[in-house]
Image (tube, coloured by chain):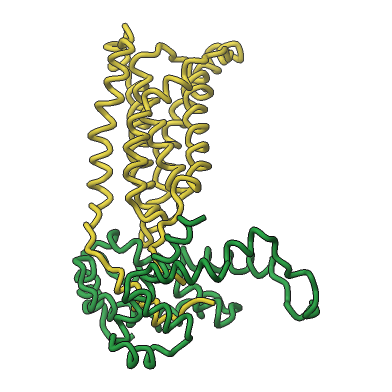
Amino acid sequence: MGEDEDVLRDWMVAAQAGDRRAYERLLASLVPALRRAARGRWRQAEAADIEDVVQETLLALHAARHLYEPSRPLLPFVFGILRLRGADALRRRYRQSGRERAIDEFSETSSYFATKEEHEDQIDAGTLHATIAELPERQRQAIEMTKMQEMSLAEASAASGMSITALKVATHRGVATLRKLLRGAR
Amino acid sequence: MRMATDELVAALAADLRPVRRIAPVWRRTLMWLLISLPAAGLVAWQAGLRPDLAARLADSRFLLTEVACLLTAISGCYAALCAELPDQRGWKLWLPLAPLALWLGTLGAQCWDVFLRLGPSGLVLTEDTMCLPAIVEGGLVPALVMVVLLRRGGRFRATHACLCGGLAAAAMGAAALQFYHVEDAAIMVIVWQLGAVMLLSLLAGLLGRIFLRPARPPITL
């Protein structure tokens, strides 16, 4: 983490006031320090687990940003979140992996993965396409290019004329709207 | 498969809205006290103050018990609000244990006095079914205010926060009870009043995980 704590604190205060640029800088600066701290704390954890912990910490920091008082140092606040939420994230991950099975154990023709009719209905491709068509123009375009056609962000940006950040935002919002619409359709 | 961390950072920044900063813990504790104290006092006044109240207020043991009870309530609130912040020191979370020990110690000393004077016959336990509902009544408004305060907090250590929050509300109810319920036998107070406070605190701690689930931002991983 290159920046000293006063700079980070200023960015956090600006983020509380809604400054997205300062917030993005703050989070980007915190990520390497969070990774290091997580690796130091959970030495047995794999790289994917550490990334999970870092992401959980960022999400929790986002939800708890109104709790930060500028008169207090920022780093104990952030690392406190890492300590409290990181343990939860790892527990959840280990519980989940305990319930998972290796796919190689089953043959390709195994009926183990056959889904029930009601499950098939939920993921019916026709419904999905129709719902995507209902999305606002920019969100629909972003979803189609980045998710359906699996274009890279750079390719999609060149094809649509949208900036990469705008594409990310439109994709994120598109997925959220899609989820709402699909939930409503059930 | 999760999104990459740099994508998450961009998505979180895109989702950013201005927030109103939460007030410091001491100020929120004061706010809780300013609402809870009159509310508990009103319950005591409505139930009818005990006829020997003037005499009891001149009794140092009664005053010490009452002060310990109120300090348990205040420190319980403070600890509950601290538990919801990620950067608070551990001793603040266990602060209510000190007044709680004083409360229990004061009542224990009174029991010991009675035992020395009257022997085991002085420590007879009878049924007193009004304590639990009376403490619930006196602690209702403090508990509701506490729920509002905790729901605006960070939802870290939810069980601990609810345990301490429940202790604060129940201790406030017990403090009010002393003003209208004529029950001075220390053993009865320990079992029925302190027992009810502990029971309600544990219940609040158990419910904590249900009502204070961690808040999650609307970001897709």
Q: A67 or A140: nearer the eye?
A: A140
Q: Classify A61 as above or below B176.
A: below
In the displayed structure, does residue A104 sit left or right of residue B53? Answer: right
The picture places residue B203, in percent across and down from the top left corner, at: 52, 36
Q: Classify B131 as above or below B99.
A: above
Q: A121 or A58: nearer the eye?
A: A121
Which image quarter: residue A159? bottom left
The picture places residue B66, in percent across and down from the top left corner, at: 35, 26
Q: A166 or A86: nearer the eye?
A: A166
Q: Classify B187 as above or below B159.
A: above
Looking at the colours in the rendered structure, which chain would you say is drawn in yellow? B
The picture places residue A131, in percent across and down from the top left corner, at: 45, 67
Which residue does the image show at 45% across and 55% down from the upper left? A184
Which image quarter: residue A22? bottom left
Which residue does the image show at 31% across and 6% down from the upper left? B51
Q: A142 or B190: nearer the eye?
A: A142
> Which color was chain A given?
green
Could you tell me if residue B143 is visible in this image?
Answer: yes
In the displayed structure, does residue B148 sit left or right of residue A94? Answer: left
